[in-house]
Image (cartoon, rainbow, N blue to C red):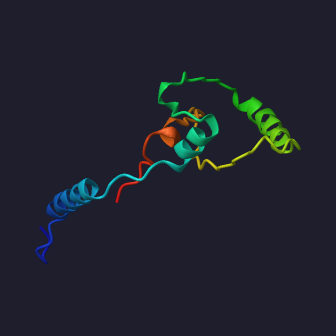
Amino acid sequence: MGDDGFEPAAFARDYQRFVAGINRLVPPRPSPVRELITDHLGHHPDDLPVLSESLESAEHPNLQLALDDLVKLPDPACRHRLFELHLRVLPGLGDIDLAPLVAATDGVSA
């Protein structure tokens, strides 16, 4: 306890209880990415198989070029929805996991 009577550990416990209470009261928001995928596929992605592809870091520019070409296609029936992933790049950790984006909720807590 500090000279002013403030106890950081007690405050942290109270704050955690407060956030847990708010999370119980506020319904989770649906994931906007999941909604886009559901609209595009016409089916919830829960029952669909998962496809995974590992790329070496040296192949990332080639993937970007392919995506750039895909977006430029003139086919009006082919709608593109782009979203940006903000990644913190750590040495040795190059995987991008879209599963949290497709989860039933957006994972945002009050």
- Picture residue at 64% right of the left edge, 50% below the top: 84
Can residue 86 be spotted in the picture?
A: yes
> Which quadrant holds residue 5?
bottom left
State the image coordinates of residue 14 (x, y, percent, origin top left).
Answer: 17, 62
- Picture residue at 59% right of the left edge, 35% below the top: 42
State the image coordinates of residue 6 (x, y, percent, origin top left).
Answer: 15, 72
> Which quadrant holds residue 35?
top right
- Picture residue at 56% right of the left edge, 39% below the top: 38
State the image coordinates of residue 10 (x, y, percent, origin top left).
Answer: 14, 62
Instruction: Describe residue 107's horizontal placement relative to residue 94 as left or right.
Output: left
Instruction: Describe residue 43's horizontal placement relative to residue 9 as left or right.
Output: right
- Picture residue at 59% right of the left edge, 50% below the top: 86
Of residues 92 and 62, which is closer to you in this image? 62
Q: Quadrant of the N terminus?
A: bottom left
Of residues 6 and 2, which is closer to you in this image? 6
Instruction: Describe residue 82's horizontal placement relative to residue 5 as left or right.
Output: right
Can residue 90 be spotted in the picture?
A: no
State the image coordinates of residue 30 (x, y, percent, origin top left).
Answer: 45, 49
> Which quadrant holds residue 57?
top right
Q: Quadrant of the C terminus?
A: bottom left
- Farthest-out residue, right: 74
